């Protein structure tokens, strides 16, 4: 599974921006509508889509799409999936 690709697709869908260019360095400031509430919605959508769970600290400290993808990949590699 290409986590970055799947995550990018999820972000485009959530923010209803199909043409949005996303890179590992993309931040909330780069995406129209990405505020604290939509960040919480994104975290929930990612947890559901990938079957993982972020700690409160992780969800609050992730700053870039690349950091989020890396965190997802690490959880998947460790088998840190929801029951």
Image: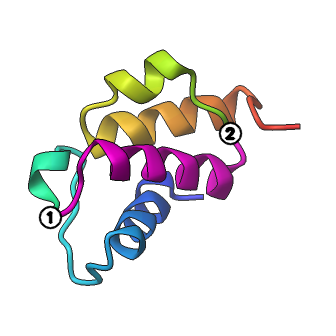
Specify the quadrant that holds the C terminus. top right
Magenta stretch: helix, strand or loop mostly: helix
Q: Is 37 one of the magenta-colored residues?
A: yes
Q: Is residue 12 left or right of residue 54?
A: left
Q: Residue at x 63, y 30 (%)?
A: 75
Image position of 40 with respect to 55: above or below: below
Across and down, in percent, residue 18 comes to 29, 83
Q: Measured along the vertical axis of the image, is residue 16 above or below residue 6? A: below
With respect to residue 27, does 32 lie above or below? below
Residue at x 41% of width, y 54% of height: 4
Q: Residue furthest left?
A: 29
SS at mark 2 in the image: loop
The residue at the far front in this view is: 37
Left or right: where does residue 15 sit relative to residue 72?
Answer: left
The number of numbered badges drawn on the structure is: 2
Q: Is residue 81 above or below residue 26?
A: above
Q: CA distance from mark 1 to mark 2?
A: 26 Å
Q: In the image, is 6 to the left or to the right of 1?
A: left
Measured as percent of width and height from the top left, residue 13 is found at 41, 75
Look at the image and say whether residue 65 sits in the magenta stretch.
no
Q: Which mark is residue 32?
A: 1
**Tag 1: Cα neighbours inside 10 Å, few (<14), some, or many (≥20)?**
few
Q: Which residues are magenta?
A: 32-52
- Residue nearest the observer in this picture, 57 or 2: 57
Which residue sits at x=33%, y=22%? 61
Is residue 53 something that shows in the picture? yes
Please tell me which residue is depicted at 22% across the width and 62% down the height of the picture.
22
Asked whether disc 1 touches disc 2, contact meaning CB atoms under 8 Å apart, the reply is: no
Residue closest to the far right: 83
Q: Name the residue beneath numbered marker 2.
A: 52
């Amino acid at each position: 599974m290409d986590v970055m690709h799947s995550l990018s697709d999820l972000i485009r869908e959530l923010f209803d921006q199909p043409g949005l260019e996303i890179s590992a360095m993309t931040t909330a400031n780069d995406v129209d509508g990405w505020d604290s509430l939509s960040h919480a919605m994104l975290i929930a959508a990612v947890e559901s889509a990938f079957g993982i769970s972020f700690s409160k600290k992780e969800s609050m400290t992730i700053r870039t799409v690349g950091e989020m993808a890396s965190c997802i990949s690490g959880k998947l590699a460790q088998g840190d999936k929801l029951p």
